[in-house]
Image (tube, rainbow, N blue to C red):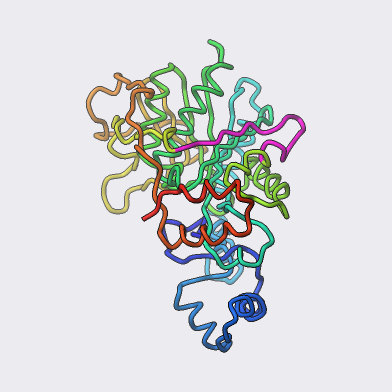
Amino acid sequence: MESHYCRSSTQKQYLEPIWQTLQELYRFYVNNYCNEQNVKPYSRTVFNETFHEMNLSLFHPKKDQCDTCVSYKTQNVTEEEYQQHLTLKQEARNEKMADKSDSTTEFVFTMDLQSVLLAPRNKVASMYYKTKLAVHNFTIYNIKNHEGYCYLWSEAEGSLTANEFSSILVEFIEKQVLPKMNDSNRTIIFWSDGCTGQNRNACLSNALLNTSMQYNITIFQKYLFKGHTQMEADSMHSTIEKRIRNKDINVPADYVTHCEHARLKPFPYKVFYLDYSFFKDFSEIKHYTSIRPGRKVGDPTVTNLKQLKYEEGVIRYKLRHTDNTWQEYSQRTIGQKKQHLNSALLPVLYRERRKIKKEKFEHLQSLKKSLKADYHYFYDNIPHY
């Protein structure tokens, strides 16, 4: 699997979280793989060297752990830097708590992408050393009424670019939020981590600004502080993971049923299974060229943004949650911002299903042996190079 937290900064691949140590993995290699293939195992030294040469790792990188807090414990960060870090963390938490307790705001959501799911999966030993199809689950949770939403798609239907997340959020606003709105409450707040490719980029900001203009609503994006991004949407991930533990997954669509039944009270999660035709090309919307606050070296960057506000055809921003005033971008606009585009008329992002690598397709073909024949058709028809 690819890294969940470091997709943009590493090419390292990670094994499924089955083995705790390299020794356990080597034991599995000798006792299971080599016996099944009737081959002589390599030595532990050769095995270890090959493992590292292939740029593999046993664990998911803990990028969501706080670098500053860890560095402070090892005395590599000064007391002043650490106290400033704690202040910023607390400001974000206080702001989120204020939104949660504000009785005048009905639509306050946290959102996050669950760690990569895989299909197929079962307890057959051959499953453990084959690559599988990645399945993505983007979750949205209303912290006011505890409604949860899952948007599921496989890597054959879409990727993890800003266009996919823009498509989901705009569809979510149009289909799940707007029908519940009234004239006196036209505000939506989204809380998330600060992942730039997912939550903090010009493509998504243009999409949300366009939606704000199209439906005359105000949208806020607010970001938790790096390293301290625990939020209510994470509870959906743990609930779903408990549900699928020790469960067989034959095809990606099996996750739909498990997500729907992962929670019964106060009500089940709403689950949407997406195909390639769902995703739109939001790069066609270009109200703003960039959402970076500064322009030259040393100026604030996108990662310094703490809040974005989309209202009346303008994007405003804050660099601290405690700032009393909003700032406007200068010289970042294109054309007439007041003229919104109808998102329904945007071109599709994909004209056909996405191709997977030939090696992965061949692995999936070999894994069909552990699946009932009814599921073979799905894997036979996945496009590949």
State left or right for residue 381 relative to residue 343.
Answer: right
Horizontal and vertical percent position of residue 61? 55, 63
Give above or below for 50 relative to 300.
below
Give above or below for 121 relative to 181.
below
State left or right for residue 89 relative to residue 284.
Answer: right
Name the residue rendered at 67%, 38% in the picture.
257
Q: Is 283 or 243 nearer to us in this picture? A: 243
Horizontal and vertical percent position of residue 97? 64, 36
Horizontal and vertical percent position of residue 34? 60, 79
Q: Residue 272 lies in magenta, yes or no?
A: yes
For residue 48, what is the image quadrant? bottom right
User: From this viewpoint, which residue is outermost toward the top?
Assistant: 183
User: From this viewpoint, which residue is outermost toward the left?
Assistant: 335
Give above or below for 311 relative to 118.
above
Name the residue rendered at 32%, 22% in the picture.
341
Give above or below for 276 relative to 65.
above
Q: Residue 336 lies in magenta, yes or no?
A: no
State left or right for residue 337 relative to residue 82.
Answer: left
How many numbered discs sit on the rendered protein? 0
Name the residue rendered at 24%, 30% in the picture.
334
For residue 211, what is the image quadrant? top left
Residue 81 seen by the camera: no
Q: Is 195 or 274 nearer to us in this picture? A: 274
Q: What's drawn in magenta, residue-wise?
A: 259-275
Q: Quadrant of the C terminus?
A: bottom left
Horizontal and vertical percent position of residue 70? 58, 65
Name the residue rendered at 56%, 66% in the picture.
15
Q: Is 247 or 53 nearer to us in this picture? A: 247
